[in-house]
Amino acid sequence: MIAIGLEGSANKLGVGIMMHPDNGSPPQVLANIRHTYVSPPGEGFLPKDTARHHRSWVVKLVKKALKEARVSVRDVDCICFTKGPGMGAPLQSVAVAARMLSLLWGKALVGVNHCVGHIEMGRLITGATNPVVLYVSGGNTQVIAYSSQRYRIFGETLDIAVGNCLDRFARTLHISNDPAPGYNIEQLAKKGRQLVDLPYTVKGMDCSFSGILAAVDGLAATYGLGGKGKDDETDTPVLDADGNGKPTPADLCFSLQETIFSMLVEITERAMAHVGSKEVLIVGGVGCNERLQEMMGIMARDRGGNVHATDERFCIDNGIMIAQAGLLAYKTGFQTPLMDSTCTQRFRTDDVFIKWRG
Amino acid sequence: MSFTLETIHLPHLPSSLPVHVALYRDVQNAPFLRQQLISGNSEFEYALIDASMILSRAHVFSAVFRAVIDYLNKRLKSRNVHSEIVFSFSPTNNIADSFRKFGISDSTKDLLVVKVSVTPEITHDSVAAHLAQSIEGSPVSFTDETLSEIADVAKIKKAYKLGALTSAPAGQVNGASNAEKMRLENSVIGAIALRGAT
Amino acid sequence: MASPEPYTPPPLPTPFTHTTPPPTLLTQGAEAHIYKTTHLTPTTPAALKVRPSKPYRHPILDRRLTRQRILQEARCLVKLVREGVSVPAVFALDWEGQSGDGAWLLMEWIEGVVVRVVFERWEAFMKAGGEGLRGERWRAEEEKVRGLMRGIGAVVGGLHRAGVIHGDLTTSNLILRSGVEGEREREREMEGEVVLIDFGLAAQSSSEEDRAVDLYVLERAFGSTHPRCEMFFGEVLVGYRDSYKGAAVTLKRLQDVRMRGRKRSMIG
């Protein structure tokens, strides 16, 4: 069976084509392409601009994906699309495209939960069978484990998503959004040396990032590091009690990452201890961060387990994950009638009935 | 004479550090004993504790445990492990105050003596012999029962700032008053463990 | 990715290197290792909680968190013992973590069954045909669960009355004190005093929000861990209301927290 997956819940438009061979051999990624809407430094991406981007690229991407996959429309079994969660206008643009293809080609529609897409793709690529999942992106921060036909949320952010925290701090420092703000923070953090004290907020398996963002933004302002080229050098270095000098932007990025990633690793470890799992799977855009992967790896090793992560092709929002999760559902008989092919900004991971797992 | 010096190996502490404990009632020479401490007579290096400030064996062992751990970790706040034992009964960081409240005074009648074998020469027999000739009082067995007869619960509660802790009304069923006793003892032991935490 | 390497638990901190017999490792929790050992006398059981340093964390952050948490935990427990709330008593602790091998806390041993296991057994029984029960027998089963739920609510109410929030209320952090070891008969499997454990994330707080989040975390733990018992969660709130005067305000706040929780699937 072959599925096309369309993803556009944020600023990436992705189209993927997935094949599950009838003889039961492993699924094959036939195509997985993406186009990203990049906003200027200091700015986030707005829904209407992002939606416009998706509308103008979706046809091109579908054509290109079919060509790359060397499949004809006849071979396709279903059109999978992201039903949510995500930004309204971009989601709608992609849902309209999916409906159009479905009507044009006479193919079944399958609405997919974005988070479930990430999890299923991560499981497929890494071979992790029943991991605790840390889903970290610009819009979501969740610790998830499977139980009785649901991906249950054990912990999540109480306010903003971790990726949002990083993206917004990138804006504060006027760091480029190309290829991604988080990527550029990661590179800058590698040059950081001193750890500044930031709030550390974990409540049970939940955590909070808004206080940390406010604190690190405040430090950037105090030391004149916010905005573009605002860095007015003072001759006398500011020393704190430990004899540390004035922090650099790199120090702030370093401290921010060390603090929030420690929180993420901590809540993941709590969930692992709770469900008795030794495997971790990191999915979502922030999951590409190598420092996060490294910290998670140390934690998992000390629990006698290991961490699974994917590279940017699958970590960052993509179409193939929607095709994968959609096809799993489709094979159990699930379809989304045209009437119900709406999308929704709020769509909890645990709302989805996971019929395909035992 | 059935002299009752008890030698105890507390769990977790090195076996080379046994603890010797003796309890006396009706002590006649408290001023003399106190004077030996003040003058720093090394033969009298003991923890001499006013037994009316003691609830139970667990109470004593908790203070001893704390002091020996601090001794092993080289974190003593006072002269030696024996003065540290007296200090360890205290919920606060004031050493002089801890001696006033928990240490021997001239009017002490019920006395608890603790000695740790910090050197190999200090043995059960050497401690027993020295105590027999130094302390004018009646040795009694170091049991929870005897301790509870001696204990001045009101004074203990005051020292640990546990005044608000309600005491079990007289004539209450045994179970409930036992629970109250445990609660008091556990509150006291918790205060000992937490002393100095900032 | 990091390949799985054989794992050896970190050495015990001093003075437990001397302990005979050595403490038995019971669980490697998220933050701490729990051992069973003795304290003060060889026959008094005790729980030893060791917080080893976390190599994944920056050393400065690690020291700050380890010290802060073991002290906070001990302070909360001591306060709750004073207030007569059912929690393990603190016997001894070391918050400095000598020679970097970890801070530790020695506590009273609570003999009993973890409430998570109690509910899991019950859910397994239900799944294995118990759901077919009707009439009296079903009502008896339901009443058992309700009773335990109220007991949980009561102890959480006592906790909040004392001005402490737990920070990690799950059914793994509740023990049904039995006083005896081993299995009990089904009829009495949910009887006993509920004892709160693991105050690793606890804090002294007088904030309505914190108390409401405490309840919300517990409610969600039921949703994720005991789907079949979730319908009885209302009884927890009944027990809570009966033991804590300020319950009405907290429960009102809980509504807000739930609403926000539902919003969380939105874009940041």
Image: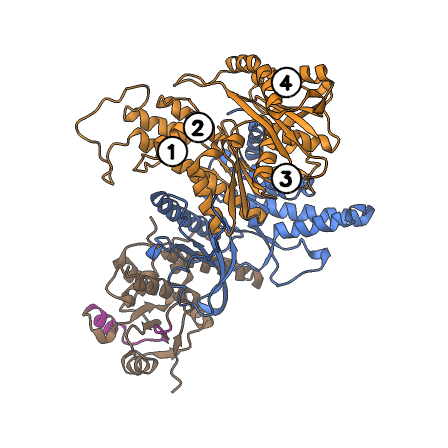
The chain letter of the brown chain reads B
The hue used for chain C is blue
Q: Residue at x 41, y 30 (%)?
A: A211
Task: Indicate the amino acid at tag 1.
Answer: Leu
Task: Indicate the amino acid at tag 4.
Answer: Ala
Asked whether the beta carbons under mark 4 and mark 2 sit within 8 Å of each other, the answer is no
Depth order, front residue of B127/B162: B127
- Mark found first going from the N terminus, 4 or 2: 4
What number is the disc on residue A95? 4
Please tell me whether mark 3 sits on a helix, a strand or a loop. helix
The residue singled out by tag 2 in the image is A165
Please, which chain is the residue tagged with disc 3 on? C
Q: CA distance from mark 1 to mark 4?
A: 36 Å
Q: CA distance from mark 4 to mark 2?
A: 28 Å
Marks 2 and 3 on same chain:
no
Callout 2 environment at 10 Å: few (<14), some (14 to 19), or many (20+)? many
